Image (tube, coloured by chain):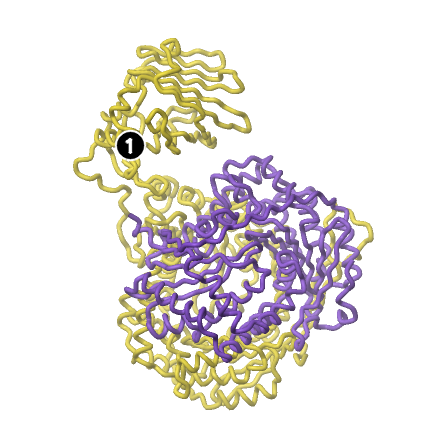
Chain colours: A purple, B yellow
Amino acid sequence: MKKSVLSLASAMLFAFSANAQKVEFEEYDLSNGMHVILHQDNSAPVVTVGVMYHVGSKDEVEGKTGMAHFYEHLLFTGTKNIGRGEWSKIVAANGGAGNANTTWDRTYYYETFPSNNLELGLWMESERLLHPTIDQKAVDTQNEVVKEEKRQRMDNAPYGKIIYGDVYRHIFDKHNYKNSLIGSMKDLDGATLEEFKAFYDKWYMPNNAVLVIAGDFETKNTKKLIKNYFESIPARTLPKRETTVEPERTKEKRVKEYDSNIQLPAILLAHKTPAMKERDAKVLDVISTILSNGKSSRLYKKLVDDKKKALQVFSFARNLEDYSVYNIGAIPLGKTSLEDLIKEMDEEILKLQTELISDKDLQKVRNKFENNFVASNSNVQGIANSLARNYMLIGNTNNINKELEIVNSITKEEIRAVAKKYLAKDRRIVIEYLPESKKK
Amino acid sequence: MKTKILSIVTILFLSFTVSAQIDRTKQPKPGPAPKINLGTPEKFTLKNGLQVLVVENHKLPRVTATLSIDNPPMSFGNKKGVENLLSGMLGTGSKNTPKAKFDQEVDFLGANISFWNEGARTSSLSKYFPKVLGLMADAAFNPVFEQGEFDKQMKQSLDGIKSNAKNVKAIARRVENALTYGKNHPYGEFTSEETLKNVTLQDVKDLYNKTYKPNNAYLVIIGDVNFKEVKTQVESLFGNWAKGNLVTQTLPKVENPTTTEIDFINMPNAVQSELAIINAVDLKMGDKDYYAALLANQILGGGGTGRLYKNLREDKGYTYGAYSGIGADRYASRFKTSASVRNMVTDSAMVEAMKEINKLRYKKATQEELDVAKAKYIGSFVRNVEKPRTVANYALNILTNKLSKDYYKNYLKNINAVTLEDVQNAALKYFRGDKSRIIITGKGIDVLKNLEKTADYKINYFDANGNPTTKPEMSLPIPDGTTASTVVDSYFKAIGGKDKVTAVKSVMISSDAKVQGMQLNLVQKNAAPNKSLVLVSMAGNVMQKMVFDGTKGYQEARGQKKEVTGKELEEAKKQAAPFTDLAYKEGKLERIEPVDGKNAYVIKHGKSEIFYDLTSGLKIKEVKTVKGPQGEMKVPTLYSDYKEVNGIKFPHKMSQKMGPMNLEFIVKEIKVNEGVSDADFQ
């Protein structure tokens, strides 16, 4: 057990102190390998209980895609002690609200309750881990629901394939990030109950999970409850994670994607970039801010305001555990061609690669990150998720308090070097995202 | 914390102590109810009428300020869109600061400032707040309305409208509003290319001068500020904002149909239908039955515990989510049930949703449901206390809705007082299953046939602009010169060419399927001119056999043998082998119809309809009408995964739907001109 970071300070009304801007927390392991993170904030009678499992779509095997996300649905069915369909009712009847979400790297389940229901939250999450109901009936219903989710989010939504990363198959040839997060419907249709159960047995275990509690609670008693509910859940052998090395691209690739829900095309420059824990990933976040965050950002000002060539510009990183994906893109205004937009974007990228940004721009970036950081820690539910993510995917919970420090230490030279290294033309995929009617 | 404590609300939960030993089989009981400190903002009013609310909260070093001008709703008629252009033009610099510099300053402070036709909002770190509030006031009260900027935004707005032309959800929402409130009502009108083009820069200026006034305005400041300091600053920044003279428009009356109807909007690219069941309601936050209406709605369609979600998603798998909502706006509101459902179950989803609405109207909910619904409101009330803006929202609601001062103090008490009878009365009054518009935005060709069959309601058709129109074409025109014969010819060409096809004298196909976990094997043998054998076996045992030797045949199942006679015999003789399609040349090319997003030629032949893909030429589906125990039923077979065997393409996947059963055959072996002898057909 690690030494408690939180000592007398926990008695303070506000755990999040305005000056230090630090998220206080305490963390330790249970004997079965389950990691626990506690963040106390007694300013409002609210508590979040979350469990993050280190399994996402990248852990799926070929021909069996979609399992990770499917579990996010399945694990609301019930447990040995919670009847079918009772889960949501119990949460609601006790004033709580919860949900779950899946990414390429992890699956996260959480509930936020009035603080007198902390024990209920612990009971429910321990039930979910210990003995969930996984049967054919649940699989059959959720199979239809997941298909509807795909239709709603991707097939019936403008630019859905960009938003939900369905274009990553063009970026990754080997790494599982190439697979759709929601999976292939064919794979899900073909999956048997035994295969579903095997997936659970493989990944869902205390030693592959982090329990996070944030909000209004009393530490001593909470630790006792955690021990009671979770420590008896047996550890199992964690499968060895195979890290696939995605070869470096050496030549620009051009592809076309079609979407029946759009009228205006979009152009997307997609790059494979370093894992989220790498410093360079942060540098790329800084580059996004320079390029497209705010009306004075370079791409926005040039393409939307001055030259009036784009309806919208965007640049963002999807930061993932093994690699990240960095996108720069635009939707043309009027008759502007996609080629023209590429040319304009290339100019700005080249500028980043060859010139140093100004002191003022650097300070602007820092101010923006500081503002975002403060805003992102405005509720306990958000803090819980952030603590768990930092522990699980970055390997250091305290990274939550280091982010600003890192951003403030990034130099102009570093920005130039990273732009040069990762935004090189021959490393990228150019995706022309076109209306279905343009399909020949 | 400077916030005064208005009240301490205690929630009525049972309290139990935590035991040392846990019993997993029992759901833990809640601990003692937490106390909620509901603060109240400090208030002051400027001479020009602007009311200022300040919630001091020093937990985080940040501040938000929201200016909202609470004018009554206005309709803009043939210049609809002018208000959005005003929103866009505000904040494009000020008379004192050109746009580029203004943008630069805001970004440099890491702040966000946004403007709209009836307000403005900032969020920033507290250390920069005085500067940010100054920027906001400057841009709000000294706007520049420049022609160049106007032209740019006009172009963007026009493209924005264009970009949504195929957005099923966007079109659904706009037609739903137009139909519910009427196109002349501020809540029902929408911006089109036409109305937008009528707007000039002068219109934007006029609107600003007329409506951007402090008369009905509120400024809400929340966060890490000092009341005294912020008051001084607000007085100096907002004190000179001059009052205006506002004329309130009379709003058109909102009416429900006399009986429930379906309003259909055809969107050929839809893969899901947007299903909405809507009626207008007259409900205000201060109404006595407001709480009952909230709880009735919660029981019907509030999140994952609502009946709609449980039925349409968790039981039937029709949708990712089905919900309902009821508004209590001061001017006009509606009750709405909604779900995005896949095309093929649109009719069933509608029937189930209507059933749930009516069930709540005519049958009392259970005590458990009511308790859960109440707990949800109580829980969300408690959870919201965490947010400083809740305090401000509540105070603002009291002011704008003219509610009693202790409205929120009594809120939980009022929720808790609602009875099952109150819920039913509210459902009867506000959920008008009898006078609703069922608005469906979807792909007519996939949806309408079933909708007509299922529904007892009249179907009206509307275009994407909410104008009445006629029923969409249910099929596409057949091009000149295309006949059943040419379609079958191109099919033969697609699978390998007529020469190769005629050289085939016999075919053997063996495929597997899984039924309830059991392996099923299907062997089909066909030989020219019309001999056929179908063998179904499970674990090596023959379950079913159908044979035809060219003149006579029989069916055998579970030891029972039955000769093929009469009409069935005639049908069998008409079949061609090994490629049944040859006979379809004699059929009738009926129509072109989409199948799973692809267009297909449909040939009618005897009791079958055969579908050939328009582009690939391949056969994708066959629908046979057979006699079942409940009368005639249609059995569709889908063909896919075409692969070559001896130079001819055969489908390697065949799926058949019989009632609730879905059989999927995967081909494991195909033999051409071997493995078949006359003995097989005995």
Position of residue A214 measured from the top left corner of the image (x, y, whole percent)? 68, 62
Is B436 displayed left or right of B415 in the figure? left
Circle 1 sits in a helix, a strand or a loop, which is it?
Answer: helix
As drawn, B591 above or below A396 = above
As drawn, A425 above or below A372 = above
Task: Pick the quarter of the image with the N terminus of chain B.
Answer: bottom right
Position of residue A318 measured from the top left corner of the image (x, y, whole percent)? 51, 59
At label 1, counting other C-alpha atoms closer than 10 Å, the crowd grade (few under 14, some 14-19, many 20 or more) is some
The residue lying furthest to the left in this view is B481
Give residue B115's quadrant in the image: bottom left
Is B23 displayed left or right of A168 in the figure? right
Position of residue A189 measured from the top left corner of the image (x, y, whole percent)? 50, 38
As drawn, B613 above or below B515 = below
Residue at the spot of label 1: B494
Give residue B190's quadrant in the image: bottom left
Q: Would residue B572 be seen by someone viewing this image from the given angle?
A: yes
Is B494 displayed left or right of A155 in the figure? left
Identify the amino acid type marked 1: Ala
Give residue B247's quadrant in the image: bottom left
